[in-house]
Amino acid sequence: MARRNISIPDDLDERLDQHRDRINASRVCAIALERELDMIEQQTRPLEVEESKVERLVERLRQQQTEKDNWYGRGRRDGEAWAQNSASLNELRAFEENWSGLEGMTLADFDPGDLEGWDDVLPEERQPEVNQQPLVLRGAYLLGWYAGVRDLWRAARTHL
């Protein structure tokens, strides 16, 4: 068995001396240290979770991210197409004025319900499909649409 020296306050040592024949200080210290170490190790030990559960969670989250990325890409392409093929100069200027609040916004910050009239500028053939999506996918599409229009308009307006 390993040996350790410990330091204790003087008054505790005096009390221990009075009861030395009735107490095993090494045993008491070992039990207290064991409890303390168990508590520390429990706090620092990684959670024991079935690997299959972790894999399913990771796969589901990756699929959600892929779906958001796909909707963002669709929105971006549709926004570019609208700016390039349909939007008038007045519509692009109105877009710049009315949608500028989205600059730097992420999906976590974005609520499509806060944008009035956003569905008026979406391609009619896309409106039913986009409106049926969960809010997070609608948000991804709209932010993509915004980025597509914004980038094309910024590049084009310097030539006007």
Image (tube, helix red, strand yellow):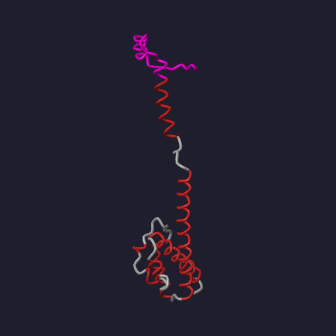
- Residue 73 in the image: state x and y as whole percent: 56, 74
- Tell me where the magenta segment starts and ends, as one range: 1-29
Q: Is residue 2 magenta?
A: yes
Is 139 part of what is drawn in magenta? Answer: no
Residue 76 location, x and y as percent?
55, 77
15 on left or right of 72 = left
Give above or below for 9 relative to 52.
above
Q: Position of residue 113 (x, y in %)?
A: 40, 73
Please state if 122 lies on the left or on the right of 18 as rendered.
Answer: right
Q: Residue at x 46, y 16 (%)?
A: 24
Labels in figure, total? 0
Where 108 sits versus 10, above or below?
below
- Foreground: 75 or 8? 75
In the image, residue 156 lies at what x, y percent? 58, 83
Residue 22 in which image quadrant: top left
Quarter of the C terminus within the rendering: bottom right
**Residue at left 53%, top 61%?**
60
- Quadrant in which the N terminus appears: top right
Nearer the observer, 9 or 1:
1
